[in-house]
């Protein structure tokens, strides 16, 4: 591992000041993503290893779940196991509790933070290996997945780069209409989570709107409306310690079998968590039955462009959407 400077920030303001002072600085909290990148010596024309690492895990205001009149405020450093086991989250925001509980193993969840899970870099093996320095995601001019091993890559929204977003909590939080608070030199801004993530068409080098001298401080989740229910399902090759082949967070509201509002967000099929708006339109106003669920599943993959080894994801998506929706009927 290369040498780097290490700073312990005691406040958000101190962290921002350090990030602003050093051009090539990175935040570290749980460290499971940043340390892996450091150990693997990932680099490219526009992707360098940090010279400075800023530890923020001892900033108290970034830790914990707070209940408010409008919903929940979850500190970015709250560990996933605390989210998984929190009584209010289990009772009223079950889709998030389930998603947090699907991350890695208990050991991973006892260290990994919510902010880290949202901001982690792609798991694409070409991005993660120093050998492939011409990768688009590292500032190169080539996507090795196009002609290489692409069984885990995207089937929707692929352009230039065909990574998938690896977060389990992101689809759940998007389905719950969450927002994030971001602190920087110019103050604090609030960004809806579905505007936080960006794909290769917008910026091939980054996966979100965070600037180098900004810190994600909090996730805000509004109180669900009456008669709301949800589910999170993750399809993976191994039972534990695996990233999703496909994941789905579904949140619906309505009574007597009729769907008034539906939100479907899928993971691991696109470079960002994928909001299935066409499927939502099919569901809203309808009676949830097998035929409607099947139509919704087919709508999700309308326009899918599988690569040479990942067409199986299309069938998984259709079946997963149908099965999950029927479980909410």
Image (tube, grey):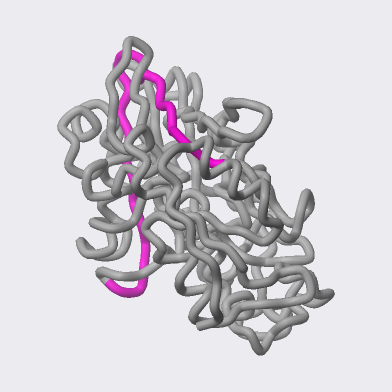
Is residue 183 visible in this depiction of the protein?
yes
Q: Position of residue 261 (x, y in %)?
A: 46, 22
Specify the farthest residue to the top. 69
Q: Quadrant of residue 165?
A: bottom right
Instruction: Determine whether 186 is above or below 3 in the image.
Output: above
Taking the spot 77% from the left edge, 80% from the top edge, the residue there is 134
Q: Position of residue 30 (x, y in %)?
A: 37, 58
Predominant SS along the magenta part: strand
Front residue of 151 and 65: 65
Front residue of 102 and 253: 102
Taking the spot 67% from the left edge, 46% from the top edge, the residue there is 20
Q: Is residue 274 left or right of residue 147?
A: left
Q: Position of residue 197 (x, y in %)?
A: 62, 45
Q: Quadrant of residue 41?
A: bottom right
Q: Quadrant of residue 139?
A: bottom right
User: Is-magenta flag for residue 228?
Assistant: yes
Taking the spot 52% from the left edge, 61% from the top edge, the residue there is 53
Residue stretch rendered in magenta on the structure:
215-238
């Amino acid at each position: 591992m290369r040498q780097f400077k290490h700073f312990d920030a005691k406040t958000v303001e101190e962290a921002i000041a350090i990030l602003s002072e050093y051009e090539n600085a990175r935040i570290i909290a749980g460290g499971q993503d940043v340390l892996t990148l450091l150990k693997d010596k990932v680099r490219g024309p526009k992707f360098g290893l940090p010279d400075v690492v800023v530890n923020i895990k001892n900033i108290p205001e970034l830790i914990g779940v707070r209940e408010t009149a409008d919903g929940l405020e979850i500190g970015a450093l709250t560990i996933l196991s605390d989210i998984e086991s929190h009584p209010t989250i289990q009772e009223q925001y079950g889709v998030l509790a389930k998603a947090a509980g699907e991350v890695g193993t208990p050991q991973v969840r006892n260290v990994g933070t919510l902010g880290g899970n949202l901001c982690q870099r792609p798991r694409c093996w070409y991005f993660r290996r120093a050998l492939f320095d011409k990768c688009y995601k590292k500032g190169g001019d080539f996507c090795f997945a196009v002609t290489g091993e692409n069984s885990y890559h995207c089937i929707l929204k692929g352009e230039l780069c065909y990574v998938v977003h690896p977060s389990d909590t992101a689809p759940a939080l998007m389905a719950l209409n969450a927002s994030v608070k971001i602190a920087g030199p110019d103050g604090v801004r609030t960004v809806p989570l579905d505007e936080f993530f960006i794909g290769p068409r917008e910026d091939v080098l980054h996966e979100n709107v965070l600037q180098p001298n900004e810190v994600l401080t909090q996730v805000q989740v509004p109180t669900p409306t009456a008669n709301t229910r949800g589910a999170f399902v993750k399809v993976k090759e191994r039972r534990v310690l695996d990233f999703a082949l496909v994941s789905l967070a579904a949140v619906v509201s309505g009574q007597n079998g009729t769907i008034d509002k539906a939100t479907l967000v899928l993971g691991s099929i696109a470079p960002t968590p994928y909001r299935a708006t066409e499927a939502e339109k099919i569901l809203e106003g309808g009676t949830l039955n097998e035929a409607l669920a099947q139509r919704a599943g087919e709508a999700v993959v309308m326009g899918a462009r599988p690569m040479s080894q990942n067409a199986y994801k299309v069938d998984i998506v259709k079946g997963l959407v149908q099965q999950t929706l029927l479980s909410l009927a």
